[in-house]
Amino acid sequence: MAVLKRHSGFEMFSMDEETVISLPGLTIYPEQRKIYRNRQEIPLTTKEYDLLCLLASNRGQVLTYTQIYEKVWGGSSTGNEKIIRFHLCNLRKKINAISQDEPFIIRCIRDVGYCFEVKSE
């Protein structure tokens, strides 16, 4: 540090700690757009990643199809429940392919939307 102070031409940069969403068996690094299940990276599409982040960051809350579609895809969600279901089905397969134990669940609330729940909470 003393050497840097003597050489005023050097710029000091500070590194902020990265925000991490940590749940039992699942770690999300939003700035890197990476998801890990039991320390193994899960390759997700952009929409799957956005969907998982939205649900995980709102865990315990029921998000309607409209809320999900507007946040992940933007625009009106009229009749787009099938698109959400399709991406959630693929997301569940990828998450469960790494580990069959389920410390969390993405629960479907029929005709309403989805809820991310951590079983230990």
Image (cartoon, helix red, strand yellow):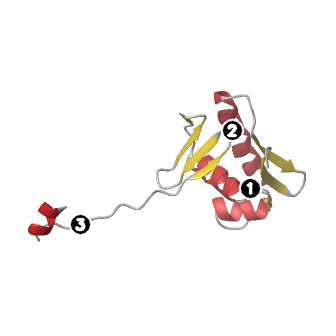
The residue labelled by disc 1 is 59
Residue 89, compared with residue 108, is above or below; it is above
Residue type pointed to by label 1 = Arg
Q: Quadrant of the N terminus?
A: bottom left
The residue identified by callout 3 is 12
Q: Residue at x 61, y 54 (%)?
A: 50
Crowdedness near tag 1: few (<14), some (14–19) or many (≥20) residues, C-alpha within 10 Å: some
> Which amino acid, by three-letter code, is at mark 3?
Met
Please tell me how crowded label 2 is: few (under 14), some (14-19), or many (20+) other residues with Cα within 10 Å: few
User: x and y percent of residue 29 in the render?
Assistant: 52, 50
- Mark 3 falls on what kind of element? loop
Residue 8 or residue 106, whichever sits in front:
8
Q: Amino acid at mark 2?
A: Asn
Question: CA–CA distance between discs 2 and 3?
Answer: 45 Å
Task: Decide which of tag 1 and tag 2 comes sooner along the chain.
Answer: 1
Side (left or right) of 21 relative to 31? right
In the drawing, what numbered circle is on residue 90? 2
Residue at the spot 66% in from the left edge and 52% down from the top edge: 51
Residue in front for this viewpoint, 107 or 59: 59
Q: Quadrant of residue 75?
A: bottom right
Determine the secondary structure under disc 1: loop
